[in-house]
Amino acid sequence: MSQSPVSYKRHRFPPPVIAHAVWLYFRFPLSLRLVEEMLLERGIVVSYETIRCWAKKFGPDYAARLRRKAPSPNDVWHLDEVVVTIGGRKYWLWRAVDQDGYVLDEIVQARRNTKAAKRVLVRLIKNQGCRPKRIVTDKLRSYGAARRQVMPDVEHRSHKGLNNRAENSHLPLRKRERVMQRFRSPGALQRFVNVFSAVRNLFVPTHLKHSAIEIHLHRLRAIAHWKGVAGIAA
């Protein structure tokens, strides 16, 4: 079933301005105030609080409409977790990426144990619709225990050096965390990464080698798709 177009009713600014502001905020390591300044340079006077509201309202809507990579039983899942401090308390952002660096899912949890790892695997299987060829993790034993409960027939490689793909996938979010001066709540972090990773998946080429022209064409297609999703295509 096709989705209805994004509704911009009761918004004073035209859809291209809203979509462009949301794209700037989630695509680049920019604060809300920097996005406000960039729009001002174009003659668009809008407050950073309005941009925050746009990001909160339209970001998830855009992300839900962005195309997803088709899952395959030959995929290799790389799983890793990173600590995020919120309000003086530690939380764990669990992330799964495939062999091309495509972010499959992210979950914010308060624990770093077998129960949390099992939740990640169960959710991945449900969302992907199939099991992977192999999973790769670091030395955290919770992954092995969870894998034996959820997918005992799937190969598991546990080695820190093999999991650089998942560990490197944390770097873009770390940059955003510094720009945003940390996150205010676990819910805010979860909402942000859901949109942030969906936008990044669309615009960032895979880790396979590409020529300059291939990367250029990939970005043009991504921009065209983004405009189509936002309902502002010419």
Image (spheres, rainbow, N blue to C red):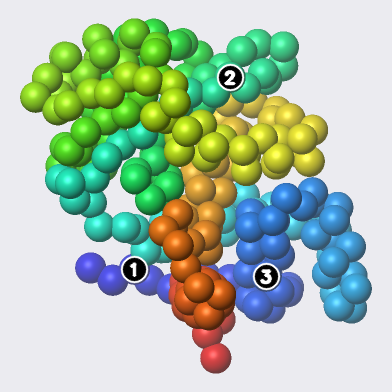
**Residue hosting label 3:** 20
Where's residue 109, x and y in %?
Answer: 47, 20
Q: Which residue is rendered at x = 53% and y = 55% of the image? A: 200
- The residue at the point 12 percent across, 19 percent down is 152
Left or right: residue 105 compared with residue 42: left
- Of the two numbered discs 2 and 3 on the same chain, state the one appearing first in sequence: 3
Q: CA distance from mark 2 to mark 3?
A: 31 Å
Q: Residue furthest left?
A: 153
Asked whether disc 2 touches disc 3, contact meaning CB atoms under 8 Å apart, the reply is: no
Residue drawn at the location 48% of the way across and 23% of the way down: 81
Q: For mark 1, what is the residue?
A: 3
The mark total stands at 3
Q: Secondary structure at mark 3?
A: helix
Q: Residue 21 bears which disc, if any?
A: none
Residue occupied by mark 2: 83
* Nearer to us in this view, 231 or 159: 159
The image shows residue 227, relative to residue 132, as above or below, that is: below
| Circle 3: residue type | His
CA distance separating discs 1 and 3: 21 Å
- Looking at the image, is 69 positioned above or below residue 123? below
Q: Nearer the viewer, mark 2 or mark 3?
A: 2
| Furthest residue toward bottom | 234
Residue 180 found in image quarter = top right
Q: Nearer the viewer, mark 1 or mark 2?
A: 2
Name the residue type under label 1.
Gln
Return the disc, 1 or 3, that comes first in the chain's sequence.
Answer: 1
Q: Quadrant of the N terminus?
A: bottom left
